[in-house]
Structure formats: structure tokens, C-alpha cells
Amino acid sequence: MTQLSADPAEQAAKELAAALFSKPWVFIRGVPSLKFLPPEGPPEIAFAGRSNVGKSSLINALVGSHGLARTSNTPGRTQELNYFVPSGYSGDEGDLPPMALVDMPGYGYAKAPKDQVDLWTKLVFDYMRGRSTLKRVYLLIDSRHGIKKNDEDVMDLLDKAAMSYQVVLTKTDKIKEAGVPRLMSETVAALKRRPAAYPEIIATSSEKGSGIADLRVAIALAITL
């Protein structure tokens, strides 16, 4: 029996992912307000999630670096949009990177003052609503806890901004293996009424490396849309 060839778009995405994530990545800029955003050019992919969801670990696993995302966690940068690009680009016109990863500030600090939450909301909402090069937001959900109220609040924000987003489950190695499919089904069901949510989710473990290749391919597909 003749084997069917792989979907051309998926195959192209795999090749693009291999090219993008085989290079070293670097931190280029922290953005505390929209006036400091880089000029629009290459496609951007953003990551959002609760504090301690494992966002830094996931970004490091994604780009194959153990310490890159820690650059964005130094004091004074916690409320900034942090930009990472493949190394070797000057940022000058005509020498732009093929894409950028944007690490958005973590949310969900139990003791965060209201004005800090309001600043986060304004920065992120204005960025998502007005950034034409932003292709997709990956919303990270801790597998140990599932979708919480403040995750739903951010989904409301994403839906309101009509910003395409995809849920990524983190730390799946921290729950029983049998519980992962059930959690994935529950999460998919919770997203069905969400107009801006991508229908498929990705289960990952930064520690074990599971799901990272799938996320790379998903990103490659997203930036070509």
C-alpha cells in the first residue's frame, strides 16, 4: 500500500521550526510601555501565564538555552514585555530577525496591588490590540491546577482583543500520567465557548522535554498564517 505523503504545510512548518530553533537566541529589549516597542517587522509570538506557571523554563526549553529567560526576571523588568530573537541580527532595516518571542509579565500574584494589576492589563491589552505583527499568544496553564479564575480573566481579555491564542499545559510531569488526557479533554471543553481560542492544546514538560517539538512546529505554523 502506498503511504500518503505528509501534509505540505506541516512539513514546511517542521523544516522552519528546525531552522528557527537550531540557532542561539538572545534577549534584545524590555518594553515597559508601548512607546518602547521595536518597529513592526518580523512576526511575533507572545507567552502569557500565571506567576510560577513555568514560563521561563518553557521558553528556555523552546530555544534550547538554560538561562535565557532569566534575563527578563531581574528587578525592574517584571512588568515589561521582554523580546527574544535568534542571534546574529542587528535590528537595522533590512537585517531583521525572522521572528521574535515576547515574554509577557506573569499575572496572579496574590498580593499584587490593584494599580500594578491595572498597569499589566493596560500594557498587555494595548499591545495585543494594536500590534499587527503579533500572530498568536500562547497561554500557559499549570497542569497541577488547571484553569483558574485569573486565567479566565486573561482569556476574557484575549477574546475582547480578538487575539488568537492557544493554551499550553505546563509541568505535565508533575501529575499522574493517566490524568493528562483527562485534563486535556477538560481544557478543550472549557475553550469551546471562547471565540479567539485555538481549538487544539499542547501538553508540555520543560523538565522532560515532552511537547516542546510540537510547540515549535505550532509556532512555525502560526507565523506563516
Image (cartoon, rainbow, N blue to C red):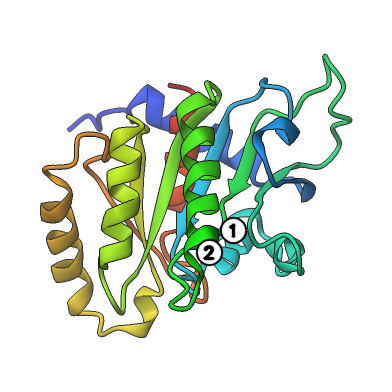
State the quadrant of the N terminus. Answer: top left
Tag 2: residue type? Lys
Do residues under tags 1 and 2 come within 8 Å of each other at their CB atoms? yes
Position in image of residue 52 (x %, y %):
50, 75
> Dot 2: few (<14), some (14–19), or many (≥20) neighbours within 10 Å?
many
**Is 187 above or below relative to 44?**
below
As drawn, the residue found furthest toward the top would be: 94
Q: Disc 1 marks which residue? A: 59
Residue drawn 37% across the image and 33% down it: 163
Q: What is the spatial separation of the Cα atoms under label 1 and label 2, in whole angstroms?
A: 6 Å
Instruction: Report the side of 178 relative to 25 (left or right).
Output: left
Indicate the secondary structure of the residue bearing disc 2. helix
Position in image of residue 99 (x %, y %): 64, 32
Looking at the image, residue 179 sits to the left or right of residue 172; the answer is: left
Mark seen at residue 55: 2
**Where does the image place residue 206, in percent across and percent down from the top left?**
51, 70
Residue for point 23% across, 72% down:
180
Identify the disc placed on residue 112.
Answer: none
Which residue does the image show at 39% across and 31% down from the upper left? 10
Q: Secondary structure at mark 1?
A: helix
